Image (cartoon, helix red, strand yellow):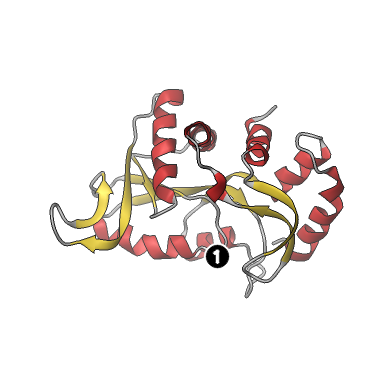
Amino acid sequence: MTYKESFIKFMVESGVLKFGEFTLKSGRLAPYFINCGNYKTGSQLAKLGEYYAECINEHGLKPDTLFGPAYKGIPLSVAACAALYSKYGMDCNYCFDRKEVKDHGEGGMFVGKTLEDGEKVVIIEDVMTSGKALREVLPKLQGAAKISIEGMVITVDRAEKGLNSDKSAVNEVFDEFGVKVYSIVNIEDIIKALEDGIIPGAEFVGKMKAYREQYGA
């Protein structure tokens, strides 16, 4: 089993990936739903960090620092940072932002590594729907120092058209900001896992393909 297949199985077993009929925030009726809020145990977080580390290593990224946007990105960046060290001996820094600037104590916008000019940063997030999180954090990061954004790593690329564009959110942010987004898996990987019996739910393959045909970027 590949690490991608293993990750899809892990999502199902964790109650994160579900199949059925779901109305998304966009109003689209989807045959699958991803709820990363269902990762809630130490063992799940440790495994999740390992999958992020595998994706980072697979794509040859060599970050100095992993950045986790508040709030969901905070535990994800910490787990990925620990896994990179334990699996690959890569001792990265990590940092995350505050929603509001702290005006007492040490103050500031960021917690963890203080960003410096020339630093290579990889952003860690769960999923990307519209690219809103990236648009919010980029000005903060670029205002802190002259860093290099090496990429952004997410769990799943839904590879769907935007509401106002035929491009996916992943392609839109690359065109707009030049930031490459890497995903552990995408919708095609999930469909193949259903077809190959890696996970239960073969009866949803037709609906998954029809949804991909209608909304795929």
- Front-lying residue, 58 or 210: 210
Indicate left or right for 116 with 24 as reference.
Answer: left
Q: Position of residue 112 (x, y in %)?
A: 26, 44
Q: Amino acid at mark 1?
A: Ser
Q: Residues within 10 Å of mark 1 (few under 14, many from 20)?
A: some
Residue depicted at 79% across the width and 54% down the height: 208
Residue depicted at 77% across the width and 46% down the height: 191
In the rendered image, the quadrant that contains the N terminus is top right
Indicate left or right for 200 with 134 as reference.
Answer: right
Residue 6 appears in the rendering: yes
Residue depicted at 76% across the width and 58% down the height: 212
Q: Secondary structure at mark 1?
A: loop
Q: Position of residue 179 (x, y in %)?
A: 47, 55
In this view, 18 is above or below 84: below
Q: Position of residue 170 (x, y in %)?
A: 57, 58
Residue 115 appears in the rendering: no
